[in-house]
Image (cartoon, helix red, strand yellow):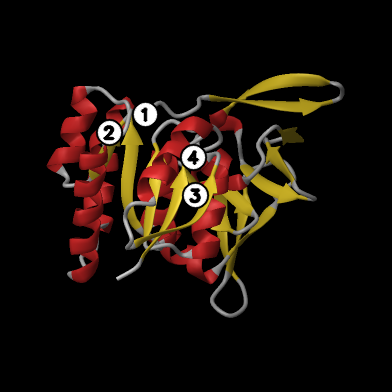
Amino acid sequence: MVIKTVVADDEQLARDELCFLLKDFQEVAVLDRAINGVEALEMIDRLAPDLAMLDVQMPGLTGFQVVEQLLRRGRLPYIVFITAYDQYALRAFEVNATDYLLKPIDKARLSTAIQKVRERMEAAENMQDRIANLLNALRGQRHYASRLSVRGAGKVLLIDMSDLVYATVEGGAIYAATPSARWMTSYRTLEELEADLDPQVFCRTHRSYLVNIQQVAEIIPWFNGAYHLKMKDEAGAEVPLSRTHAKKLRKILKW
């Protein structure tokens, strides 16, 4: 059995040390290394590894935020978190049978983690529920952004998240729409912005759109099972809702 693996850690020394230790495990094939959460998410999408070893604290997206994005997509590899978290968080890992490695990494502990992954792969065990339960247990420690910095007319403004109607990507830039204007943000991807937002309020509707469900005025049937969402901004913008994302939004809004 070969365990195709992606390693993600923003600290080069830690990343190199882990990859060096993994060389002694013949069943582990390291496909690539990511230096932040955004790169890790792209790498997992592209390479479809069996295992992702994710540092909890990374720029762009944390290890937890990467996993949240993967859960939303329904494509989750086996996960081993790399962490320096306190005992409360470690207890949450243990209760949900989710493996973790403490820094600095102990080789014997790494061997145990790899053995667990091997056993779960052989048993074809689905870890999605356990990972979701872990994130729920830790969610009390999460603080979603309440304000968003945007740029326009040569200045930086702060807007309340409740005033964010939708966000979209155009020309490689992420724009935020408020009831009366549209502004450029400093986010690099919609995934990065989505990770900072409360998932009970903000929902992905399309690969290029993220909406505040409290700002939806009307759901308009479209072609081939898709829809348009008419928003509450002054322009009455219509945002596409793909057939795939409509299933999730239908559950949230119960229409």
Residue 102 on image: x %, y %? 28, 31
Name which residue type carries label 2.
Answer: Leu
97 in relation to 250, above or below = above
Instruction: Give the labeled residue for mark 4.
Output: 195
Determine the CA span between mark 1 and mark 4: 11 Å
Q: Are marks 1 and 4 in contact (CB under 8 Å)?
A: no
Determine the CA span between mark 2 and mark 4: 15 Å
> Label for residue 203?
3
Determine the CA span between mark 3 and mark 1: 18 Å
Q: Dot 2, crowdedness within 10 Å: few (<14), some or many (≥20)?
A: some
> Label for residue 138?
2
Residue 80 on image: x %, y %? 31, 46
Q: Dot 4, crowdedness within 10 Å: few (<14), some or many (≥20)?
A: many
Name which residue type carries label 4.
Answer: Ala
User: Would residue 188 appear left or right of 107 to someone viewing this image?
Assistant: right
Query: In which quadrant of the rendered view does residue 36 lie?
Result: top right
Determine the CA span between mark 1 and mark 2: 7 Å
Of the 4 image quadrants, the one containing the C terminus is bottom left
Q: Are marks 1 and 2 in contact (CB under 8 Å)?
A: yes
Determine the CA span between mark 4 and mark 3: 11 Å
Instruction: Give the labeled residue for mark 1.
Output: 142
Name the one closer to the observer, 191 or 210: 191
